[in-house]
Image: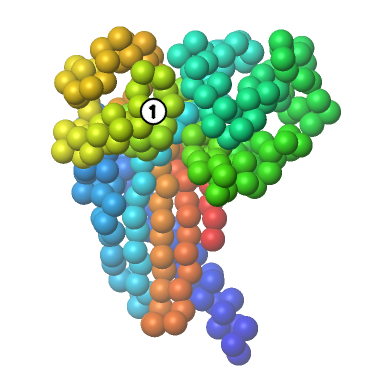
Amino acid sequence: MQRAESVSFIARSRSIAEIACKYASEKIAQDNNGYDSRSEPLYAYNGIMRSEIDGFTVEVSIEPLDDKIPINGILLPDGVTVRSEYSGAWERIWENVGLPWLTAVVLDFIDSDSRQKLGGSERNASIDRQLCDITELKLIDEIDDGVLWGTKDIPIGLAGYLTVYGKEKVNINTAPPEVIAILDDKIDIAQARNFAALRLMYPIKSLDDLKKIPNIPAEVITKLSNIIAYESTYFRLNINVSYGEKTERNFRIIVKRENNSCSLVRWEE
């Protein structure tokens, strides 16, 4: 009976999560104000939507993504050449994780040809395609969980800088200070943190808004204008479904907004 009740709860909670996902996706699709920021009630850090469905309690929070450098968008459409705006950031990322010699190796791992780049290496593990998940980088011998997620010696791992949930641009309204600082060597972490604080009060909707932020050099803004966005394409839904005090189930769902609607990309529970 306990097993049957457990199976029933899993099925019912999944059904309720699907309803919540559909509702949240509609809210995201309707948000067309030109920017996606944590300053908006829909995406606020403490913004949780609560409801009761068939005796279950469901809580939903929404995170706008595109907040890191899109590893699948750092190459030009030819699938081989690195976008000039990302080249410096790409090198700094590998320096920060202590593996600068992988700068070209990883490009050979993900680019669309089998020709070796200068300083690179076409290995048997090279997938020569875009990543489906950031953990695919662990197919490279030198990359382990510590390099990917960070350690005591590597405060920010690769997953702190790179994402597969993005197209070609970084949403400057959601990028953490560490990512903002890595975009250009003329932006230090103090400037990036100050920027992150200001954007909660003054969300960025255009290049003109960005230029009003103090201490960000104008030449840097001009240089990065082709890789800066103000809206997100991908969103993470964190859904908690509970029944009573002891039984609950959590879901992490990625949706993609496109053409005024949202489609399901990933479902974890």
**Residue occupying the far right of the picture:** 124
Classify mark 1: helix, strand or loop: helix
Q: Position of residue 259 (x, y in %)?
A: 37, 30
The number of numbered discs placed on residues in the rendered structure image is 1
Please, is residue 5 above or below residue 227 in the view? below
Please, is residue 106 above or below residue 83 in the view? below
Q: Residue at x 62, y 83 (%)?
A: 3
Q: Residue at x 28, y 59 (%)?
A: 49
Q: Position of residue 90 (x, y in %)?
A: 54, 22
Q: Residue at x 59, y 87 (%)?
A: 2
Q: Residue at x 37, y 38 (%)?
A: 176
Q: Amino acid at mark 1?
A: Ala
Residue 29 visible in the current orientation:
yes
Q: Position of residue 165 (x, y in %)?
A: 49, 36
Q: Residues within 10 Å of mark 1 (few under 14, many from 20)?
A: some
Observer-nearest residue: 10 or 219? 219
Quarter of the rendering occupied by the N terminus: bottom right
Residue 95 occupies which quadrant of the picture? top right
**Residue occupying the far front of the picture:** 153
- Residue, disc 1: 181
Could you tell whether 193 is left or right of 159 in the image? left
